[in-house]
Amino acid sequence: MKVKISLCTLALLACATSFDAEAQKMELTGTFNESKVILPSSEYTPDAPYTATVWVFNEGKRYADADYNHIWGEPDTDSDGYKWYEPEYKSDDASGWETARAPFSSDAFYKGQQSHRWITSDITGEIYMRRTFTLESLPEGIVYLACGHDDGPSEWYINGELVHSVSDGWKNEEYKELSADQKALLKTDGSENLIAVHVHQNWGGAFADCGLYGADMSLSTTLLNTVADGEWPCKYYMLNYNSDIEVAEAAGWAAQTEDESDWIDSLGPMSNDDNMFLITQWPSQVRPILIRRHFTFTADNMASLAGAELKLTCSYDENPKIYLNGNLIWSATGWNDNNYVSYTLTKAQNELLHEGDNVLAVSLSQGEGGGHIDYGLQIVAPYENSGIISAEADGNIVREADNRVFNLHGQYLGTSTDRLPRGIYVVGGKKTVIK
């Protein structure tokens, strides 16, 4: 039976429960930046080739399928019982080690540099590498390990501790974010560090690499979470036909003032299949759906938008249209499987927000096969060290005392509070309310 659509029944789907402003998640994140070189790699800084001591197992054995991922050998422990990846290990010429210059590749040249060709593409074998270096300092934020390899299994150690491994495959441009504990393995007192690497070669090209890089840091404030941070409250309304979506649009279903008395309170994300998005069942093969999510936008959120970006993330199936306070801000056709698209709102779209309650709504079409929806909204601000020492359990932010002004996202705003919007700031190292 067809649902009758009218202005009153289009009290369609809206997220009944507002997002608690006190629960807004703030997270410091990093993006790999190959220009922030700590220790050069062949992949990302080819014009600065490094030297290492290497041990190669290459007996000229041609690859056969029965040998796939078979490790042919590794260096013996030294006379004191240390293994090849430990800092104390003696990698001398007598035990088969040699000093060589990167890149370590089966190609004659790699990114314009002459290679140390430890193996050829039709031969299977192993390379073990020990690279020593000193550091006087490390960036405050995230550090990435460049760990390009062709093939696997492969392993990377920092000062004797395993920090990364791959069981199969190849990826010359691979990098890995070091955890805080892994980053702490790196010594910055001028004493020697060691990165030890093993890469296995099956067939085809061969490549082994390592290096360290910094990150572009940003501070993200979650206004609406995705399933990565758990289920989310919403209201929804199912339609009968895809053509009903246009009727609903004409009735202004996504507006903040929509009467939600006929909407169903629920939890997202939604899916028609038993997958990562199945919190609430949605029969997407036969019913289009409308969803509304409410969130609170605070005065501090408003202040933090200066110099920041508002980012929408969405995984969908299919044909989503997303509205902010009744205004269409983004749409797509088809589906993106289990992936997420990221969209940065324009300045004009940011201005659709207002202090207090806001609504981010989405419509999706009925379609064949699978169907799901997961979406979220974040404020993403560039982060520079602003003197933050720690964030205490009571939420107070502790900074070095001076006359600088920051918002709670660590953005430097100058040395005066004149003309600042009302909100909470850190002034001279103390949390201050500007009215």
Image (cartoon, helix red, strand yellow):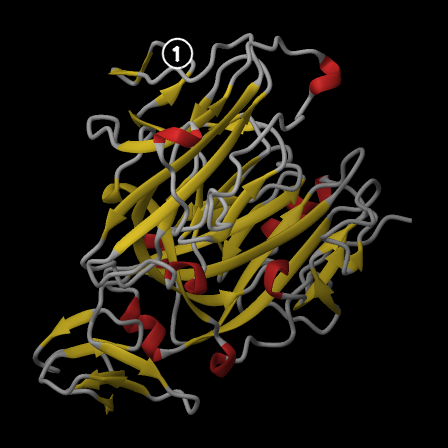
Vertical relation: 232 (above or below) 278: below
Disc tally is: 1
Q: Is residue 223 left or right of residue 241?
A: left
The image quadrant of residue 254 is: bottom right
Q: Is residue 411 left or right of residue 60?
A: left
Write the residue at 73% across / 55% down: 270
Write the residue at 73% across / 40% down: 242
Q: Is residue 255 visible?
A: no
Write the residue at 48% across / 67% down: 223
Vertical relation: 233 (above or below) 330: below
Q: Is residue 182 left or right of residue 360?
A: left
Vertical relation: 286 (above or below) 282: above
Question: In the rendered image, which quarter contains the C terminus?
Answer: bottom left
| Residue 151 x, y percent position in the rendering | 55, 25
| Residue 432 x, y percent position in the rendering | 23, 90
| Residue 81 x, y percent position in the rendering | 51, 50
Vertical relation: 388 (above or below) 110: below
| Residue 264 x, y percent position in the rendering | 76, 68
| Foreground residue among 237 and 59 | 59
Please identify the residue farthest to the right as the structure is shown. Answer: 1
* Amino acid type of the residue that numbered disc 1 sits on in the rendered structure: Asp
**Residue receiving disc 1:** 107
SS for dot 1 = loop
Q: Is residue 27 visible?
A: yes
Q: Residues within 10 Å of mark 1 (few under 14, many from 20)?
A: some
Q: Is residue 121 left or right of residue 229?
A: left
